[in-house]
Image (cartoon, rainbow, N blue to C red):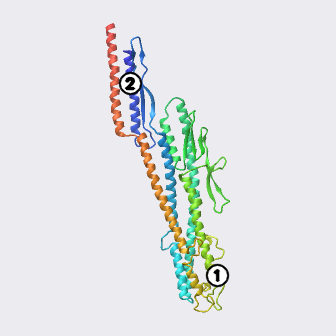
Amino acid sequence: MFNLLSIGKKAIMLNQNSLDTIGHNIANVNNPEYSRQRVVQTAADPINDALANYGSGVEMVRLERMRDVQLDWQYRNENSKKNYWETLSEKYSQLETIFNEPSDYGLSANLNLFWDKWEELSNNPSSVITRVDLKEAAIRLTNSFHDIDEGLDDQRKALNLEMENFAEEINSITKELATLSKRIQLTEAEGKPANDLLDKFDAKLDKLSEYGDVKLQIREDGYRMVYLGSDEIVDFEGARELTTVYLTEVSKPLANVVFKENYKEINSLKDGKINATLEMRDKIIDNYQKMLDDLAIEITNNINSIHKTGYGLGNPPSNGMDFFWQGTTDAGNFRLSDEIMTSHEFISASLDGEEGDNRIALEISNLRTDATMNTNQSFGNYFGSMMTKLGTDSFNSKKNSTLYTNTTQQTLQFRESVKGVSINEETAELIKYQQAYMASAKIISTADTMFQTVLSLIK
């Protein structure tokens, strides 16, 4: 009878724990951080006597957290790649907006208008009105270069600010990870499960993986060490703080994320938002800005070399004037020469100064199709190739973004199949353990009845 009471007591306690756990699961069904839990049970040690070994009921082994470490690692790996391509795709879209092609107001349209006006001047080399129109077209062209150059600089500055935000966001995450790591270690050291704390810890790791590749190492003493790239960023003592420093030795200041204690960059960091931002800021934008600068410089040099050998209007006609400012070194300072800005009459069309001579205007007009760039392309084709490359690169980044979004989602679904809570399954378990609880109570009730019967016989 006493063993029967003990069996009933153990059973009712285990079923109560199971019901509590199922209730906790159901309560967190819509919590994306939560991992399903279950009570792991085993038969209690038997009671030995001279005749046999008698069962002594059931015992709770542990409260198990349903999680697959391999799926966690795979998800974070895919999540880093997804955020890399998502960030790159978003920045490419912004880059396309800056160039604004094809457009009636973009650089390509203004370049064509510029050549059209030179062609008109070659057809009417003495025209004052055509020179006024040409000057206006040239100003529009230089403004297009300025707008794109300024847009690229603004995007670079915005990316610098994003790097500063990344450092602050990562610091916030790693501080929470360090706090959770200590709480988990203390809880587990007391022999208690830290399942809900572990869920919060893993959710923060997932968030951290957006910025780059993340690794987790668990020490023998229970502390969790977190690595970003190949650098330890959370250890048993706490979190290493990040900050940003600006590289001032370059022509345009660049903000880099570094460790605050020694100003060293994160080593071997792969994928994630940080790498995508650095790729866009330090390579892609620089590459397109250099191509734009080369175009402005070549237009300046080629037109000036012809223009200053010709004659404009006036009595005597002007001679030896640059059309564009000869000091042009990039798209940002590409502009008309001071003389042309002063008067449109300084625009050359004649080779010998004779009225009606169009040889200078015609030669400059022919630059429209001449392969003057170092890539053996005309100015228009060179810029067209730039835009084709931009469109292709942008398309590829969107395609990769979609690809890794899908693979990340697929991995997440696999992970949810392990850790996620199913209402139908939990409801079925609830009914099962409710019935088991009632049956356990019946065991105790029966044992009590038997005990009372024995007591009545003694009386």
277, above or below 435, in the image: below
Q: Amino acid at mark 2?
A: Ala
Viewport quadrant of the N terminus: top left
The reply to whether residue 87 is visible in this rendering is: yes
- Quadrant in the picture for residue 455: top left
In the picture of the structure, the residue carrying the numbered disc 2 is 11
> Where is residue 132 drawn, in percent x and y?
56, 84
* Distance between mark 1 and mark 2 Cα atoms: 100 Å
Query: For this rendering, which residue is in front, 238 or 391?
Result: 391
> Where is residue 195 drawn, in percent x and y?
48, 36
In the picture of the structure, the residue carrying the numbered disc 1 is 339
Q: Residue furthest front?
A: 376
49 with respect to 197 (left or right): left
369 with respect to 326 (left or right): left
Mark 1 touching mark 2, by CB under 8 A?
no
Viewport quadrant of the C terminus: top left
The reply to whether residue 459 is visible in this rendering is: no
- Quadrant in the picture for residue 278: bottom right
Q: Amino acid at mark 1?
A: Glu
Which residue is drawn at the image coordinates 64% and 81% (left, top)? 339
Callout count: 2
135, above or below 295, in the image: below
- Quadrant in the picture for residue 178: top right
* Residues packed near mark 2 inside 10 Å, few (<14), some (14 to 19) or many (20 plus): many
Q: Element at badge 1?
A: helix
Q: Element at badge 2?
A: helix
Query: For this rendering, which residue is in front, 148 or 391?
Result: 391
